[in-house]
Image (cartoon, grey):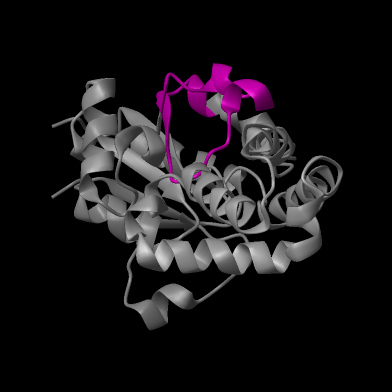
Amino acid sequence: MTPRRPLALLFDLDDTLWPIGPVILAAEVSWHAWLAEHAPRVAQAFSVAELRVRRMALLERRPELVADLYQLRREALAEVFAETGEDPAHIEGSMQHFAAQRNIVAPYADVLPVLPLLQGMLRLGVITNGNADLEVIGMDHHFEYTLSSSQFGRAKPDPGIFHAACAAMGVAPQDAVYVGDDLRLDVQGAQAAGLRAVWMNRHGSQAHLAAGVTPDAICATFDELLAWIHGQMQLSRA
């Protein structure tokens, strides 16, 4: 059966619109420097790496926190503040500092030229497990709807978050396409929820073969995504 022409295109953010690894690394270095100034007992007792280990240990005990990574960071920080006798009044300030640094992203070079072209063809939305703030970043005007796992309460690949975004945009899952870099969370998650899924594979990985995942399309750039969407838009709505 011929696929239906899509009505909505939804995106993952981190490692799809911009690389996130360098951003988080820089944010955590800046965050630790903030702690050294305002909560020195914590900074002296725990390195960036040790604080990360504490968050992962907390996540093992409370896996539901995967849906809200800011809350995970906040609660892990509360633990080490208590252990070191540091003033908990500084927890919120440290979180605000990290959030500001986390939103200093640089989109891939092909993203900003292509987004307006896609926006002119169909409706754009976002489904993310992360905590990027598109308004702060200055990209919110490209998207009519954004849903984060922290808002929804469950994270990708839970089908519910895909269905909720489609419902909010007034489109059926079969009329939506999801674009993301993660085979399990983005491609398998979207396909299991009834959406088509494009794997944004910028590095030529063959991981989908070993994983047994078959994306509806594989794109290395947003220009390739635009060309694929052009083809999809020629399909019949029947």
Residue 133, placed above or below residue 27: above
Horizontal side of 145 relative to 92 (left or right) equals left
Residue 83 placement: quadrant: bottom right
The percent coordinates of residue 161 (x first, y second) are 27, 40
Residue beneath the point at 18% across and 46% down? 2
Q: Position of residue 219 (x, y in %)?
A: 52, 55
Which residue is rendered at x = 67% and y = 27% of the image? 137
> What segment is highlighted magenta in the picture?
118-146
Q: Residue furthest bottom?
A: 210
In the image, is 167 to the left or to the right of 233?
left
**In-front residue for pair 116/185:** 185
Total marks placed:
0
**Compared with residue 74, is residue 140 higher up or lower down, i.e. above or below?**
above
The residue furthest front is 85
> Which of the two residues, 4 or 48, is positioned nearer the viewer here?
48
Dividing the picture into quadrants, the one containing residue 122 is: top left
Q: Residue at x 58, y 27 (%)?
A: 134
Quarter of the image with the C terminus in it: top left
Could you say which is closer to the camera, residue 33 or residue 186?
A: 33
> Measured from the top left, where is residue 208 in percent x and y?
41, 73
Asked if residue 133 lies in the magenta stretch, the reply is yes
Question: Is residue 100 on the magenta stretch?
Answer: no
Residue 178 figure quarter: top left
Q: Can residue 63 be seen from the camera position used here?
A: yes
Relative to 236, does residue 77 appear above or below in the rendering? below
Residue 235 appears anywhere in the view: no
Place of residue 116 in the rendered image (x, y in percent of width and height, measured from the top left): 58, 23
Residue 42 appears left or right of 141: right
